[in-house]
Image (spheres, rainbow, N blue to C red):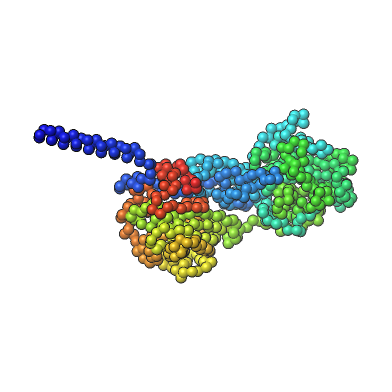
Amino acid sequence: MTKKANFYAIHGAFYYLLCSVLVILMVSGCTRDVYDPNGGGEDKPNSFDFSTTSTIQLNVKYDVPEGYKVLFNVYFEDPFTIDENGQTVLRTDINPAITRMTDENGEYHAKEIVAADHGADAYIYTSYVGVPGLVRTTITDNVINADIEWELTNNTPETRAAAVTWNAPNGFGVLGTWQTNGRPNYLNTEGELKLSNTILNTIRKVIPEGGNCPVDYRQSVDFEVNDPEKRDVEVSVRFIGGTSSAASAFGYYCYRGEATKAKIAATKKYIIFPNTHTRDAKAKPVGLKGGECVKLHYIDENGVDQGTVFPNGVKIGWFLFNDSFKKNGNKGNITLYSTPKANSNGRTYTAAFRINDFVVLSFEDYTIDQDYNDVQFNVWSNPIEAIAPDVPSVTPDPGTDDDRSVAYRMTYKGILAFEDNWPNKGDYDLNDVIVKYNSVLAFNTSNQVLSTEDTFTALWSGASFKNGFAYQMNTDRSNVVTEFENISDTSQGLDRELAKATVNVFTNALVATENNTKTASYKIKNTLTTPVDHETFGVAPYNPFIMVHENLGNNRCEVHLVNYKPTEKADMSLFHTGKDLSSPNSGVYYVAAENYPFAIQLVDAEDFSTTETESVDITYSDFIKWVKSNGSEYKDWYKK
């Protein structure tokens, strides 16, 4: 009996052990690859910072005259598109990732914080005249290097017998041949001029991109030759540049007397520049650079070329074939004349003014806007007194800077999500406090921050705690004047007890959202008494954090983004307790061994929500893949 009993006991134990092993194997084999809260180990903090931004070094250099600063934008995708009218236009559905201004030597070197999910391509665009408008480059090892000079594309010479890329339309004359990119082989190098910063700054300020050209400058600009001493007169045209993305052809015609519609129609017309494109957009070639010159020929009433000498009494008009280059033998989308009667709608498409003796002729190349700066030329004569068009004179602008004037603005947006159980382990649903931000920073020409206009919207409070929200800027409190659009709480505004400018936005997210029945927006303007360099100041949302239990006083529990420093009011004794593995002496804050953060910024996010107590990786399945890749993959996990 004893042996039999022992046999059954041993048999039963073995059977129980075998079943246990099978159950463990079955469970482990069926386990979903879910969020591992202990992924970093017990004692070693996770080195991943859970950042949805990255830092790149931006090095840009334009070839410019001394003193000419260039405002430029950086995009991570092609900023141009073709509209319904077949025009190449700047896209309105994307914003530049970076906007900055060069120094007086055309250079810019600084670190920039951008969304981490960008690709390898970078497009550098400027609307400033006198420099290439669009340059495509690549991001290598988080560095953008762009040494930008006039680069003429596909400039292999063509002979008249060869098949050219663009032919003058039937009935139109030419001054010679041109290369496949539209670069004339008849450029007058003696008349070429290096455009000064004064000329370029003045043109830009008189007819700025996106502005509204003053009516005084909008006029017919047919030039009449009239030399008081009746000397031999030669007339030339210099190309300045422009803001258009169209590859348009530019030409002229000569006539005498009144400019009737019939007379202009019958006048022989000649091409000067086959291609005025400078932006290298949508594979359109570039064949000219600013300051290059062509000497005109006098074409008499019979259409005969009489050489380069113009007699008194001859008038010179101008025309533009909108976006015609590459359309062989085609005038393009529309033909525009400087003589309004010649235009089918009778509209004036030209503007003109003079900067001392430098006469600017500028075309509006379509009908969409009113800035009249699309293609720009300088018309001059030898002797200079021979042409004296009745155009307004403008005061030269040397380009001096005003450090208090706004040169440009940048917009930052996204969502912030917080766990309020720090330093203890939360449920990692990241919804205890959810705040949306939209911030507009204003900069001067030295890339210093002048002011911020911040809108923070309390979206959700998934916690039972009463949590406040604030943000800290990297400048002294005494350097900031803060204004709320509406004050609903006496605690809102600058914290007067902290050295750095710290703005209390709201003190209780549950109250702000009325227990999650609405959202609440807070609009705040911060004006800096002394401008601060953008690298020092940083970007929005600055250093955002929540204050647990409505605590605005000392020894409070603050929850910040990973490695963002707490304020002087934070209870420092909480660090390196619970699940927190921070090392304040080493500048390491809000880190843990687990594969989740206590707070996260979702740059450019429009929406974010998780189910209460449900870990973030269940709602967003690519989150854990992003974490395990150390942020190198699935960078857009929260946008899906």
Q: Residue at x 46, y 53 (%)?
A: 609
Q: Residue furthest left?
A: 2
Please identify the quadrant where the N terminus is shown: top left
Q: Residue furthest bottom?
A: 490
Q: Residue at x 60, y 57 (%)?
A: 407
Q: Is residue 498 above or below residue 89?
A: below
Q: Residue at x 71, y 32 (%)?
A: 157
Whole-percent x and y of residue 163? 74, 30
Q: Is residue 473 visible?
A: no
Whole-percent x and y of residue 465? 38, 62
Whole-percent x and y of residue 71? 60, 51
Question: Which of these two is toward me, 166 or 480?
Answer: 166
Q: Is residue 627 left or right of residue 226?
A: left
Q: Residue furthest front?
A: 1
Q: Is residue 464 above or below residue 277?
A: below
Question: Which of these two is toward me, 537 or 345?
Answer: 345
Q: Is residue 260 above or below residue 280?
A: below
Q: Residue at x 80, y 44 (%)?
A: 252
Question: Which of these two is toward me, 617 or 412?
Answer: 617
Q: Is residue 108 left or right of residue 256?
A: left
Q: Is residue 83 visible?
A: yes
Whole-percent x and y of residue 556? 36, 63
Question: Which of these two is toward me, 422 or 556?
Answer: 422
- Picture quarter containing residue 511? bottom left
Count of numbered tags = 0
